Structure formats: C-alpha cells, structure tokens
Amino acid sequence: MKKAIPFQIFVLFFFYFCSTTKTDKVNTITNNQLTPEENTPKWSAYQGNLTWSEAYAKCASIGRRLPTINELTNAYKTDVSGWWSEGENYWSITENKNAKYPGEYFTLSKSVGFVQSVEGVNNRHTRCTGTKVIIPTVIWSANQGKMNWKAAKAKCISMGMHLPTIEELNKAALSGLTKTWGDDDFWSSSKSYENPEDYQTKKGYHSHPSISLNVKCTGS
C-alpha cells in the first residue's frame, strides 16, 4: 500500500512550484519587452536642432542619411518616434516639389504625425537613418562668367544643365567643393523668401536679377 504524501509537504511543494514558475515568467516577459527603438537599430541617436543643410551634413558625417518622409511617418505609426524625447518636429530628406519656392522639405511631428513643408533655413530636430549615405552623382560646369540671373538661367539650359538651387549650392559648400571656386558669389535658382523679385546667392544674399554674378551650372 502506497504511503500518502503528508498534506503539509504537498502545500509547501505547491507554493514553491507556483512561486518559481511566476518568477521565470516575469523574467521572460521583462527580457523581451524591448523598446521599439531598441528593436529598430537603424535610427541614430539625436543629432541636434539644425537647419536642413546642417542636418544633411551631420548625417553624412556619421555615415548615414536623413530619413525620407515615408520613413518618418512609419516611425510614428509604429510608435518608434514616441521614444524620441528631445524635440517635436524632425527633418526628412524629402523635398516639397510643389512648394512656391525651392528649398522646402517635409518635417514630421513625432507625437501626432503631422507632416509640414518647411524652408530649409529653419531649425528642426534631427535623427539619421540607414547604413549608407545616398550621394547622387552631381556634375558642375566651369565658371561661366558674370551675367544677370535671366542670362545665367538661359546659359545653363543651353548646356543641358540647370542653374543650381540654394540647397545644391549649400551641399557643394558642405562637401568642400566650393573651396576651389574662389571668393566670388554665384547665382542660385531659388527665389528670395524676403523679396519675391530677388534670388538667393551662394553667399546668402538676396539679389535683384538685374545685377551680374558668377554662374556655375549643375546636373546629374
């Protein structure tokens, strides 16, 4: 005849089993509860409150790039951006092609997902993504001499190229390319945000199209 297990021993064994099982379960859940950001290591650490050109250069300097507006939107939808505590609105690399003036880029509000078109001269928050910097092949012409804005635009078109936007000039400056251009100022195709009749120049001025400035054309 089998001996019955004393009731006290059974109770002690039961509580020991439940306690051990619960602890193991809690540890398992805790170890798997990684933040969305930890599960998406493609996002960089916070890079600062910068202009678009500064943000573009900053990402390139760490071997990465600004995110597209679709990537930012996806970060919001998957709650990745909810873990970004440094600021509200973040730059994307996506230019607004329908903007009134060139040089506007889309930003995303990380807490509500609101997309806005903002001029690149403004400051917004920056995080980088990707493991590879997208560097398009850009060709620059020789200096075409000094001429007014209308003649500069026509000259570039006649060469199968275009007058650069202010953002293209800024990227050339950030890459060090313009160091070989001397101290002269150059036309851009970007309208002035101070006076609609004027155009922005390489040195940051807003000049009337009737004056003569140096011209370099670009294309890809």
Image (tube, rainbow, N blue to C red):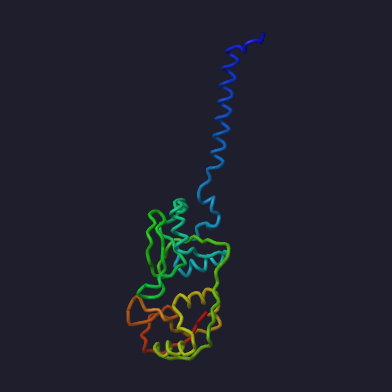
Extreme residue toward the front, this view: 1
- In the image, residue 23 lies at what x, y percent? 56, 31
- In the image, residue 26 lies at what x, y percent? 54, 34
User: Does residue 208 show up?
Assistant: yes
Judged left or right of residue 134, residue 83 is left
- Residue 53 drawn above or below residue 15: below
Extreme residue toward the right, this view: 1
Residue ID at (65%, 10%): 3
Instruction: Choose between 182 and 47: the one closer to the eye.
Output: 47
Q: Name which quarter of the figure residue 51 lies in.
A: bottom left
- Residue 37 drawn above or below residue 146: above
Residue ID at (40%, 75%): 102
Instruction: Choose between 33 and 183: the one closer to the eye.
Output: 33
Q: How many marks?
A: 0
- Image quarter where the N terminus lies is top right
Residue ID at (52%, 56%): 45
- In the image, residue 83 lies at what x, y percent? 46, 51
- In the image, residue 91 lies at what x, y percent? 44, 63
User: Does residue 48 show up?
Assistant: no
Q: Name which quarter of the figure residue 89 lies in.
A: bottom left
Instruction: Choose between 47 and 16: the one closer to the eye.
Output: 16
